Amino acid sequence: MSSFFIATFMLVLLLLNRSSIGFTASRRAATTLTRGEYNTFHNRFLSSCNFNEELITVNQDEKQSNVSHKILWTTEEGTLEFEAKDGELLRTAALRRGIVTPHNGKSKLINCRGLGTCGTCAVEVAMGGKVEPGEKNSRERLRLSFPPHNPNRQSPLLRLACQIQVRGDLHVTKRSGFWGQYDDLSPSSKHETYFGDLEYILDGRSPNE
């Protein structure tokens, strides 16, 4: 992006300094460029910026966001299925699809909305499931080692749904308890939200809906 700002700054300077593009005050008193002159300079301006590489990156991101993965979500009620976009946070995907929620009971209302500080969206991701990061990040390690979570007692497959991006098909199990901290299955993961799209307003990583 630095080349873009440098080129923009150069454009402003060149427009102010008419002699740099072949004009003099004696030859032309007007302060505007003709269409031909503007097009010539505009093309030179664009060629000085590395737009091609940026456009390729954007197109790759857009293409990647069109890829979907199958999510199997298991509770005491059984297993439900929904799709998540590639790169979508698991918590955001669940809430957007309107089928399940990663929160139990009153934690559907009382949670950190994706900051990774409350620990209520803890879910068990079966081995072989592709998520990013592949290992717990610092927020997960901190929160999942703090009561009522206990890494010595709980499954090492426990992750925070608000911290992991979906990169492949997943089988997710939701355990019971306000924080999902117990061993038995959650009675239900029935979808319910209180603030609509604001539930994942802090999510800056998921592709757009």
Image: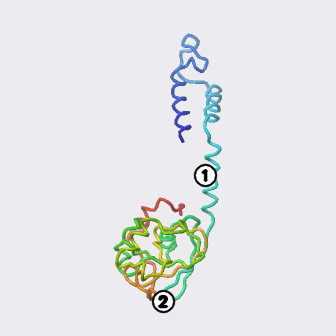
Q: Amino acid at mark 1?
A: Val
Residue 185's x, y, as percent?
46, 87
Real-space Cα separation, disc 2 to disc 1, in angstroms: 42 Å
Q: Amino acid at mark 2?
A: Glu
Element under label 1? helix
Residue 66's x, y, as percent?
62, 63
The residue that label 2 is drawn on is 76
- Can you say whether 135 is above or below 157 in the image? above
Q: Nearer the viewer, residue 45 or 140?
A: 140
Element under label 2? loop
Picture residue at 48% right of the left edge, 89% below the top:
76
The residue that label 1 is drawn on is 58
Residue 153's x, y, as percent?
42, 83
Crowd rating for badge 1 (residues with CA inside 10 Å; few <14, some 14–19, many 20+): few
Picture residue at 61% right of the left edge, 74% below the top:
169
Crowd rating for badge 2 (residues with CA inside 10 Å; few <14, some 14–19, many 20+): some
Q: How is the image coloured?
A: rainbow
Horizontally, residue 62 falls left or right of residue 107, namely right
Residue 125's x, y, as percent?
53, 77
Q: Where is residue 126, by image quadrant? A: bottom right
Q: Where is residue 179, by image quadrant? A: bottom left
Question: What residue occupies the far top of the structure in this picture?
Answer: 26
